[in-house]
Amino acid sequence: MDGGALKDALREAAANLESKTQFFPHMSTTDYRWNQSQAAADYDAAAPVIHPQYVAVQEGVLAALPFAVDQAFRLVDVGGGSGRLVERVLEQFPLATAVVMDQSEPFLGVAQQRLERFGARASFVKHRLQDEWTATVGPLDAVVSSSAIHHLEPAEKQQLFAKIFAALSSGGVFINGDEHRPAGDAEYLALLEQWGRHMESSHASGAIPESFGTVIAAWKKRNIAEFGSPRKSGDDCLETLETQVSYLRAAGFSPVDVPWSRELWAVFVAHKP
Ligand SMILES: C[S@@+](CC[C@H](N)C(=O)[O-])C[C@H]1O[C@@H](n2cnc3c(N)ncnc32)[C@H](O)[C@@H]1O
């Protein structure tokens, strides 16, 4: 390679790196803990065990979908990860089509494998929740999500809710099964410690992959050892149930219901009039 070509190659590499890091000023997207292949495979295997209400949250989201079994509708799962929730939607509603949207290539890869049997009924888009993603997923009758939106800071959540409201057709519904925090710090910390113990005992019993141990240790450091420290986008940025309901109402949703909640989890059902 001559000097000019080398300079061009270096310039291109620098631009490429910049475009990869612009979304998270404090980290590159490849550093974000959800973007490692091992993390995606481990989380997929561990999720229904380490998340004490994983299945109950899914059931709550499915129960809130306002469609008849033989109705055709289009839905997107934002932060849909490895496609576990979309799999249940497509099984339960044979005429539905669904998009899994996530910022993580490794998670989308696992989702693609899981949903291959549904053919064109399942599709996949790589976006951050903070991106302008609505135009790429087409008209929507429903938006669902589970355990993803709590990674956004308050302002990002509010922007996302406004975007979802605009993307839904009139009469559409947004159902979010996600984490929330009690108002009091002592109660919040006690619930986090309880969850930490649950994850550690699941790991010790061999119910989840051995390599997930480092993920649990990092989770405990962020959420328990550093309890009360400032949260930034990508951390676990939990708000109270009432705050999240107020964000949904401010985005224009009405009514907004919380048909189910337990410990740190709740299902928020927000209707677009
Ligand atoms: C705890 S996992 C949950 C995955 C899936 N929804 C489930 O219930 O199994 C969190 C997911 O949110 C995704 N995620 C986190 N921050 C995101 C962001 N800013 N934009 C898009 N996806 C994000 C991660 O890549 C990961 O797939």
Image (tube, rainbow, N blue to C red):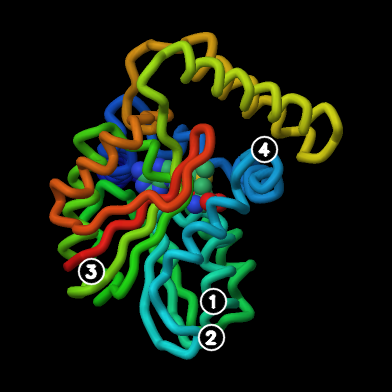
Residue that badge 1 annotates: 90
Q: Secondary structure at mark 2?
A: loop
Q: Secondary structure at mark 1?
A: helix
173 with respect to 50 (left or right): left
Reply above or below: 273 against 201: below
Give the amino acid at mark 4.
Answer: Ile
The CA distance from mark 2 to mark 1 is: 6 Å
Depth order, front residue of 72/236: 72
Q: Residues within 10 Å of mark 3 (few under 14, many from 20)?
A: many
Q: Residue at x 73, y 25 (%)?
A: 200
Label pair 2/1, CB-CB below 8 angstroms: yes
Labels 4 and 3: the sequence-earlier one: 4
Q: Residues within 10 Å of mark 2 (few under 14, many from 20)?
A: some
Label pair 4/3, CB-CB below 8 angstroms: no
Give the amino acid at mark 1.
Answer: Leu
Q: Secondary structure at mark 4?
A: helix
Residue that badge 2 annotates: 94
Labels 2 and 4: the sequence-earlier one: 4
The CA distance from mark 2 to mark 3 is: 21 Å
Q: Is mark 2 within 8 Å of ligand 1?
A: no
The CA distance from mark 1 to mark 3 is: 19 Å
Q: Secondary structure at mark 3?
A: strand
Residue that badge 3 annotates: 168
Q: Residues within 10 Å of mark 4 (few under 14, many from 20)?
A: many
- Report x, y in % for residue 120: 49, 84
Image mark for residue 50: 4
- Report x, y in % for residue 263: 53, 33
- Report x, y in % for residue 7: 27, 39
Give the amino acid at mark 2.
Answer: Pro
Labels 2 and 3: the sequence-earlier one: 2
